[in-house]
Amino acid sequence: MSFKTCNCGQVWNSRESFLSDSAVRLLGYQVDFEVLREGFFLFNHHSSQCQTTFSLQAGIFFDFYKGPVFKERLAGTEHCEGHCLRQDDLERCPQKCECAFVREVIRIIDEWPKQSAA
């Protein structure tokens, strides 16, 4: 069973091969404040044959993060910097917010080492 198949027919057999592909770029994050794992990471497959943008459920990447997960949600409070509200914002969140760990998952994905195009 494969991890993801693009509309162009490109198949990635694992999360690691998907993230290592130099033609795959993380574009953003669409939050689901009710169930964080049901939010979406948005990706672009940018190759000579393909310009597809697609989403993958955020929760399938959560096990990459090994740090603390805070219990209190600060979204909508004076302490919130609004990162999760801006779909194309890939920055870390310095707050002790329930959502902050997702920002760390974003960093892990965005900084994943890419293989050189063959």
Image (cartoon, rainbow, N blue to C red):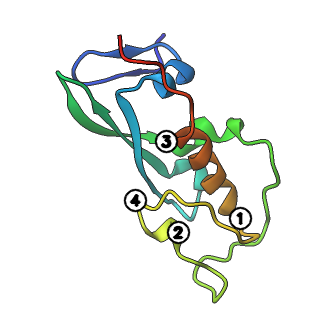
Q: Amino acid at mark 2?
A: His
Which residue is depicted at the point 50% across and 18% down? 17
Frontmost residue, 115 versus 95? 115
Which residue is depicted at the point 54% across and 44% down? 58
Kindly indicate whether the residue at mark 3 contacts the one at mark 4 (C-beta within 8 angstroms).
Answer: no
Structural distance between the alpha carbons of marks 4 and 2: 9 Å
Residue to which mark 1 is pinned: 98
Structural distance between the alpha carbons of marks 3 and 2: 18 Å
Residue to which mark 2 is pinned: 83
Structural distance between the alpha carbons of marks 3 and 1: 18 Å
Label 1 SS:
loop
Q: Amino acid at mark 3?
A: Gln
Q: Residues within 10 Å of mark 4 (few under 14, many from 20)?
A: some
Q: Nearer the viewer, mark 1 or mark 2?
A: 2
Label 2 SS:
helix
In this rendering, position of residue 54 left or right of residue 107 = left
Frontmost residue, 45 versus 69? 45
Q: Position of residue 79 (x, y in %)?
A: 67, 84
Residue to which mark 4 is pinned: 88
Which residue is depicted at the point 48% across and 10% down? 1
Q: Position of residue 101 (x, y in %)?
A: 69, 55
Q: Tell me which label, 4 or 2, sits earlier in the chain.
A: 2
Q: Tell me how many marks there are.
A: 4
Q: Tell me which label, 3 or 1, sits earlier in the chain.
A: 3
Structural distance between the alpha carbons of marks 1 and 2: 13 Å
Residue to which mark 3 is pinned: 57
Look at the image and tell me in which quarter the C terminus lies.
top left
Q: Amino acid at mark 4?
A: Asp
Q: Residues within 10 Å of mark 3 (few under 14, many from 20)?
A: some
Q: Tell me which label, 4 or 3, sits earlier in the chain.
A: 3
In this rendering, position of residue 45 left or right of residue 35 = left
Q: Position of residue 77 (x, y in %)?
A: 63, 86
